[in-house]
Image (tube, rainbow, N blue to C red):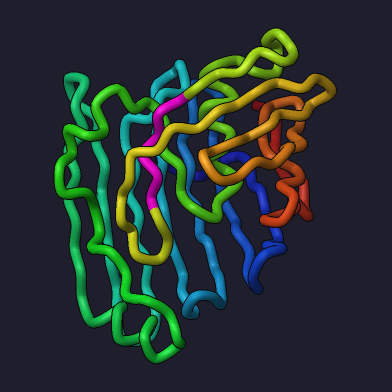
Amino acid sequence: MGVLSAGLFWERRDVPGCEHVRLDAQNGLYARGTVLAAEPVEFACHYEIQTDPSWATVRLDVRSEGAGWARGVRLELAAGRWRVTTSEQGDLDAALVNAGHARAGLPGIEDPDLLYGVFDVDLSGSPLTNTLPIRRRALLTGEVGVSHRVSVAWVLVPSLEVVQADQIYTPLGENRVRFASETFAADLTVDDDGFVTDYPGLARMITLGRGSS
């Protein structure tokens, strides 16, 4: 895909960092973005997401890299099953241990069949990926207070370990959606297109450069 027509930028609130993405949302979503963060170690995470017209994810490519290490993971949906491929260079574990953190899990997932029935991906630390179930389930026009359980491929950053996770999205009205997992909940504020403008404790959109979507 050539030049993308829209751009979004978020400032992180939990750690020093930001996210920038260029996208096209005319017929589903195609997006290329970068997440920068200083914790748990300094890293850059570059991603590419593609959905079908219903906003169900069909492909996610992610590469994270820092001093002395790099990892990659690709998730592709074909015939209802996910294919997961990974790459790894250097030693992320050494960087984490030197920074006083625990070792990371391996990139990818040992059994991709655990992702059967998943239609959304969730890249940790990225408010963009919260938009995927919001648009796919049409939550901004859904009944207020009715919860929707979704199964996601949760991609942990910077390790790129992939975990199946259940999440709950509940439309609250007035461009607000409650996001909840087993141990966490936050009331997200979104714009009229379902893109997160405020994610309490995580990120805040600080520029609005998107064209029509």
Q: Residue 36 at x, y = what percent?
A: 54, 68
Outermost residue toward the right in this view: 174
Q: Vertical placement of 13 versus 76: above or below?
A: below
- Is residue 16 magenta-colored? no
Locate the C terminus by quadrant: top right
In x, y percent, where is residue 159?
A: 34, 65
Q: In the drawing, does residue 162 fall left or right of residue 49? A: left
Q: Nearer the viewer, residue 186 or 49?
A: 186
| Whole-percent x, y for residue 26 in the image | 55, 24
Measured along the vertical axis of the image, is residue 40 above or below residue 200? below
Q: Which residue is nearer to you in this view: 167 or 194? A: 167
Residue 95 position by quadrant: bottom left
- Residues rendered magenta in the picture: 150-155
- Magenta: main secondary structure: strand
Query: At 58% from the left edge and 33% from the top edge, which residue is drawn?
Result: 131
Where is 113 relative to 75, above or below?
above
Q: Quadrant of the N terminus?
A: top left
93 or 136, nearer to the observer: 93
Position in image of residue 122 (x %, y %): 46, 42
Q: Residue at x 31, y 78 (%)?
A: 92
The number of discs equals 0
Locate residue 186: give its quadrant: top right
Side of 128 relative to 111 (left or right): right
Q: Residue furthest top?
A: 143
Residue for point 51% across, 59% down: 34
In the displayed structure, 71 sits above or below 58; it is below
Residue at 70%, 11% (x, y): give it: 141
Q: Residue furthest bottom?
A: 98
